[in-house]
Image (spheres, helix red, strand yellow):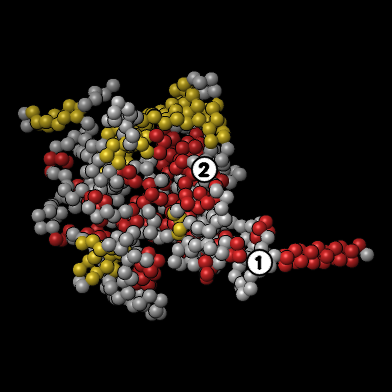
Amino acid sequence: MKRIFTIISLLVLLGVLIFKENLIKRPEGFSGEGCLFCHKEMSDSDRSHPVSAFGCSSCHLGNPYSLDEKRAHATLIKNPGDFRVVEMTCGKTGCHGEIVGRVKKSLMATNRGILKVVQDEWGNEHKGALVPEKPLDVRDLYGKQSPSNVPLDLYRKMCGGCHLWKEKAGGKGEVGKRGGGCSDCHVVDVVDVEKQQNQGSLLIQHPEMTTRIPSENCVKCHNRSARIGLSYFGRFESAGYGTPYEGGNLSSRRLSGNRFYLDLPPDVHFEKGKMVCIDCHTATGLMGDGHSYDKMADQVDITCEACHSPRFTSKVGAPRFKLGFSPVQSLANRLAFLNGKIPEPEKRPIALTRKGTPLYNLQKVNGKPVFYRKMDGQPLTLQGVSELKNAHHNLKGHDRLSCQACHSAWIPQCYGCHLTYEKSVLQKDWISGKKTPGKWKEARSYLRFRKPALGVRGDGRIFPISPCQVFFSAFDDAGQYIKADSFINLNLSAFDPHTTREKSRTCIDCHADPKTIGLGEGILSRNGGKRVFRPTHQPT
């Protein structure tokens, strides 16, 4: 009897719900999702995801069959690109599953490189932190049994707000714009959408999704550490003096975090070609190739040679979506279609990166290489290395020189990076979102933008290197300095400064420069047939 009563009650409840749902009259001829009954003027996110074809629930889930707001929004996902749900949205069957799998292994998602460097620093100098045998990535820190030590605490509080696993929960400042998985790079115009929400308006303007990623989306993260996002556009983060003064006041040139900067010569690719980050950097180089790397140099597939000594596909392809043609050409056509500005290569030969991925914006037209800017499709004439008759690219003994070794005009150099750690003071952990004991402060001194020193990279090539002298000072609960836990360590990092100029360094710039040949800052002279070095700073 009790069971029959329960069944009858459920049927009555179901009938009430159906009746209530039908009180909301749908417009005649309306066959789309219930979402579009309210959001009928919703704009398309991009040309590949029109609302008329995809609707809303394909990406945002929710209940598309209900016209009641609470029930329709009950399981709604605000950001489909979030890595916590992406398998149900962008990465589901028939969409971008293969790409999602690659991106989750990329360095922008794992941060394996940063985590390894931070732990190596302490592993070499501080007995209290052992470097784990298995490389860590960000996901390991989100678990309940996540590892914990001093260098990982540094990462959590000073670096952990800049990776693709970070939830995009809004918030003020640059950190609030970071994270969100796929959306971190591919979504723009969020400000206009947030304005609609703050005004209480019905959301009708969808954030724009694009493969023409503006450099602002890159620089919001890449303005620290190597500072390549700043250097490329001619900005050097200076010391905190605020000079040169403007009308008796501190300089108005400010970066995020109230950091001052100076205007220096930008990279020639930006200065003359108005090229942005994505013009060089490819989908494979940024989103990964399916392997998990510890170094960005291993993941990035673009090189100077890819454009200035291009290697083109030997076999021409066929029109987009036609069966039986080269997979590389097929991908190039598809990428050009998604870009919407660059002409589709179709049967034109296209250039390849060092890993064999297509540079769909570098095509051979009438037998000559033509480079198309990705943001506007503007064609640029390329200057090949073989065309430079007066250049000295084949000097004996210079085989290992990278292009950057000679053509990088300057590099940010920080000789005094001072980290202080107060064990008992609370600070926000960007991974957990909570305040935990241990507060970090960062100070810098002796910042310079001189010509790069040169060093030998892991692959044997000569590359620009930047020094960073790290001072680490630990303080106990009483605020007393702990000498045993503190240390000083000099780091040298090899990377492309992104300050390329057409004019290269001279012979003297390298062979008579004490810093370039590894002696340090000072004066190198000859005395009695011998070289004599006088350092700027005498060792103590």
Q: Read off the residue under disc 2.
A: 171
In this rendering, does residue 234 appear at all? yes
- Left or right of 11 in this view: 241: left
Is residue 75 among what the camera can see? no
- The residue at the point 34 percent across, 65 percent down is 341
Closer to us: 275 or 457? 275
Q: How crowded is mark 2: few (under 14 residues within 10 Å), some or many (20 or more)?
A: few
Query: For the point 31% across and 56% down, which residue is it?
Result: 280
Q: Which residue lies furthest to the left in this view?
A: 528
The mark that comes first in sequence, 2 or 1, is 1
Count up the numbered dots.
2
Instruction: Say whether residue 475 is left or right of residue 518.
Output: right
Instruction: Estimate the x, y position of residue 229 in percent, counting from the top left.
Output: 34, 46
Callout 2 touching callout 1 (CB < 8 Å): no
For residue 317, side relative to residue 96 (left or right)? left
Hey, what amino acid is under mark 2?
A: Gly
Does 249 appear above or below 501? above
- Residue 247 point in image, percent of width and height: 29, 28
Q: Where is residue 393 in the image (x, y as percent from the top left)?
A: 15, 54
**Residue 326 percent location from the top left of the image:** 35, 74
Distance CA(mark 2)–CA(mark 1): 32 Å
Category of crowding for the residue at label 1, using alpha-carbon neighbours closer than 10 angstroms: few (below 14), some (14–19), many (at least 20): some
- Three-letter residue code for mark 1: Tyr
Q: Residue at 20% across / 27% down in the picture?
A: 535
Q: What element carries label 2?
A: loop
Using the image, determine if residue 37 lies above or below residue 243.
Answer: below
Location of residue 223 with respect to 193 vertically, above or below: above
Q: Mark 1 points at which residue?
A: 65
Classify residue 118 by image quadrant.
Answer: top left
In the picture provided, is 53 more to the left or to the right than 466? right
Instruction: Give the SS element for disc 1.
Output: loop
